Image (cartoon, rainbow, N blue to C red):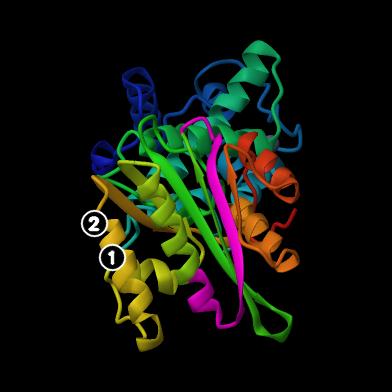
Amino acid sequence: MNEIWKLNIPPKVKIFFKVKIFAWLLSRGRLKTKTRIASFCDNNDTVCQLCRLGDEDLNHVFFSCPFASGVWQNAGINIYDFSSFDAWFLSWFRKGYHKVNTENLIVLCWKIWEARNNLIFRQKTVSPIMVVHAAATLEAGFRDNNLVRDTFPLSHYGIIKWTPPPPGVFKLNFDGSVRDKNKAAAGFVIRDHDANPIFAGSRSFGSSSVPIAEGSALRDGLYHAFLLKCKKLIVEGDSKLIIDAAKNNCTVPWRLRTLFKDIWFLSSQFEEVAFIHIPREANLVADAVTNHAHSSPTPTTWKQKLPFSAFSAFNFDYFSSSCSRGFAL
Ligand SMILES: [Zn+2]
């Protein structure tokens, strides 16, 4: 299990060592669960404090305990393909399993263990969703500090959450949609490291397709980020085709080529730009801004504010909740 030491786990040095040591203890089965303590001293209390339904051993704490199930469920992680924690844990180190995935699972385990310790030693209770949130925040802090090196989105390992960019970097979210009678709309929002909206815009443009609406939204957003003199930019969209095309990872359909000439040119004007594909559920503000154009025929922009219809989405992002796939406001 030497791979444990190669994992790129956390942000701050202190937490970094804590999590690494935790990961090592976990891999050796040496975490001091009640059952393990009872095996070498006279202690008959082996009941799990989190649920009071079973004996607390590794398998229970991280796998069969209803509290743990709640955490995995809220993080959108399916554990039911495995019969035990041991079997699942070993699978995290199999070839082909993404390292970032393993790191995130270990951070989630660490947060479950912390919740257990807080309850036993400090009488502090937390809910499974709070555990997921805390893990996501820790991971987000780590990744935000490593913008260029690792732009793997949280959603790739089950946690869906919009996160603000690090200081000095702006984040552009874009979206496009087509409604009745093929009426297309494009919208985008640019936010800073405090999640404040810097600029947003939306417009409708008659009959068109979703890829053209999405591509137009990206071009509009990049253009305004350029005008605003943003130097470093993270771009997020829920259209895989558009993100792949922006990264030059796929052949651009001919209908989109003119759009992409602009997109590539604009992208080259930034000091740093990273394109990330995110699930729809992490793109709610851009979606709400885009929807505005379906009810308003004239193009609209907002400087340091958002349309009222985007407020619930904005608050949802701002207060850092996370959600599972299929979530809607
Ligand atoms: Zn339990």
Q: Is residue 131 left or right of residue 292?
A: left
Position of residue 50 measured from the top left corner of the image (x, y, whole percent): 70, 30
Q: For the residues labelled 1 and 2, say whether their Cβ atoms are less than 8 Å apart.
A: yes
Viewer-closest of 225 and 77 = 225
Q: Which mark is residue 110?
A: none
- Residue depicted at x 35% and y 87%: 254
Q: Is residue 102 among what the camera can see?
A: no
Q: Which mark is residue 264?
A: 1
Whether ligand 1 has any atom under 8 Å from the Cβ at mark 1 is answered as no
Q: Secondary structure at mark 1?
A: helix
Q: Is residue 82 left or right of residue 271?
A: right
- Residue depicted at x 55% and y 29%: 113
Q: Is residue 278 left or right of residue 49?
A: left
Viewer-closest of 56 and 79 = 79
Residue behind mark 2:
268
Q: Is residue 140 magenta?
A: no
Between the C-alphas of marks 1 and 2, the distance is 6 Å
Q: Is residue 202 magenta?
A: yes
Q: Which stretch appears magenta?
A: 193-214
Near mark 1 (Cα within 10 A), the count class, few <14, some 14-19 or many ≥20, is some
- The picture quadrant for ligand 1 comes to top right
- Residue depicted at x 75% and y 53%: 329
Task: Name the image quarter holding residue 316.
Answer: top right
Position of residue 235 measured from the top left corner of the image (x, y, whole percent): 41, 53
Q: Is residue 2 among what the camera can see?
A: yes
Give the residue type that dot 2 points to: Ser
Give the residue type that dot 1 points to: Trp
Q: Secondary structure at mark 2?
A: loop
